[in-house]
C-alpha cells in the first residue's frame, strides 16, 4: 500500500502540446517580450519620431535665446561706443579751450610790452638791439596765435572797438574809426582786448560834399545856358 502525506494534494501531470515538448508557460512570455524589443530596434515607431521632434524644438528655443542675448550685448556695446566717442569729443574740446585760455592769460600780460614797442616804433626809437628783441617777441606771440587789429578808416564795430573819443565830421557817412589809440588783439575768434579808438559821426543835417558840389555845378550850367565850348 502507498502512504499519502496528509494535507498535500498531488497535481496531475499536464501533458505538453504537440510540437513543443517540455516547454514551460514562462518561456512563452519571455519570447514575446524579446520579439517586441527586436521589432522596436529594427523598425523605429512613433515614439522615436516624437523624440526627434521634441529635441528639435528644444534646440530652436535655445537658438532663439542665444540670438536674443547676442542682440542685447550688441546694443550695449553700441551704446558704450557712442558714449565713449562723445566723451572723447568733450575731452578734446575742453583741452583746446583750456589751452586757449592759458595762452590768452599769458599774452594778456604781454600786451603792455607790445604797446610800448608800438609807441617806440612810432617815435623812431626802435633801433639797435632793442629792435631785434622787439621783433623777436612779436614773432613769438604771432606764432602763438595773437593777431593785431584796428585801423583808421574802418567802420566802428562795438563788439571789437572801444570808443574813447567822439566827434562829428562831414567827411564820413557812418560812424568811423578816425584814430587808433591802442590796437586790439585777438586769438582766433576770441577777442583778448578790443581796439581803443576815436570815432567820428556824420555831421547832423549836412549833405555829402560830393553831392553838393555836383548840384552847384548843374545850377551854374543852367544859368549860363550850358557848358562853355572850348
Image (cartoon, rainbow, N blue to C red):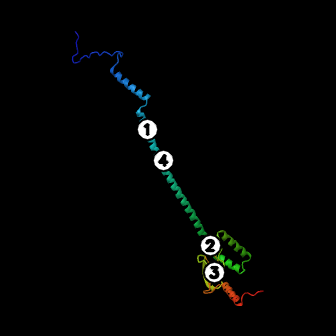
Residue 59, compared with residue 172, is above or below; it is above
Q: Nearer the viewer, mark 1 or mark 2?
A: 1
Q: Are marks 2 and 3 in contact (CB under 8 Å)?
A: no
Q: Are marks 4 and 2 in contact (CB under 8 Å)?
A: no
**For the residues marked 1 and 3, what is the alpha-carbon distance in whole angstroms?**
92 Å
Q: Secondary structure at mark 3?
A: strand
- Badge 2 crowding class, 10 Å Cα cut-off, few under 14, some 14 to 19, many 20 or more, is some
Mark closest to the chain's N terminus, 1 or 4: 1
x, y percent for residue 156: 61, 79
Which badge, 1 or 2, comes first in the chain's sequence?
1
Question: How far is disc 2 from disc 3 in space, using C-alphas?
Answer: 21 Å
- For the point 46% across and 41% down, the residue is 59
| Residue 96 x %, y % | 59, 65
State the count of labels. Answer: 4
Q: Is residue 186 left or right of residue 226?
A: left
Q: Which residue is mark 1?
A: 53
Q: What residue do we see at 35% from left, 22% from top?
A: 28
Question: How far is mark 1 from mark 4, CA to CA?
Answer: 21 Å
Q: Mark 4 or mark 2, which has the lower sequence index?
A: 4
Amino acid at each position: 500500500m502507498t502512504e499519502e502525506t496528509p494535507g498535500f494534494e498531488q497535481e496531475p501531470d499536464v501533458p505538453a502540446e504537440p510540437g513543443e515538448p517540455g516547454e514551460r508557460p514562462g518561456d512563452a512570455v519571455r519570447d514575446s517580450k524579446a520579439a517586441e524589443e527586436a521589432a522596436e530596434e529594427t523598425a523605429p515607431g512613433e515614439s522615436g519620431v516624437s523624440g526627434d521632434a521634441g529635441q528639435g524644438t528644444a534646440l530652436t528655443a535655445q537658438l532663439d535665446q542665444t540670438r536674443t542675448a547676442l542682440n542685447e550685448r550688441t546694443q550695449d556695446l553700441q551704446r558704450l561706443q557712442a558714449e565713449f566717442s562723445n566723451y572723447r569729443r568733450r575731452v578734446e574740446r575742453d583741452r583746446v579751450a583750456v589751452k586757449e585760455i592759458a595762452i590768452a592769460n599769458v599774452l594778456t600780460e604781454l600786451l603792455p610790452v607790445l604797446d610800448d614797442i608800438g609807441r617806440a616804433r612810432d617815435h623812431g626809437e626802435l633801433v639797435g638791439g632793442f629792435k631785434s628783441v622787439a621783433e623777436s617777441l612779436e614773432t613769438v606771440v604771432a606764432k602763438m596765435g595773437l593777431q593785431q587789429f584796428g585801423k583808421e578808416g574802418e567802420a566802428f564795430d562795438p563788439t571789437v572797438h572801444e570808443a574813447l573819443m567822439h566827434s562829428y565830421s562831414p567827411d564820413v557817412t557812418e560812424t568811423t574809426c578816425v584814430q587808433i589809440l591802442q590796437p586790439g588783439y585777438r586769438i582766433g575768434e576770441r577777442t583778448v582786448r578790443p581796439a581803443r579808438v576815436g570815432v567820428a559821426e556824420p555831421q547832423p543835417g549836412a549833405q555829402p560834399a560830393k553831392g553838393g558840389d555836383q548840384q552847384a555845378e548843374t545850377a551854374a550850367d543852367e544859368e549860363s545856358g550850358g557848358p562853355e565850348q572850348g
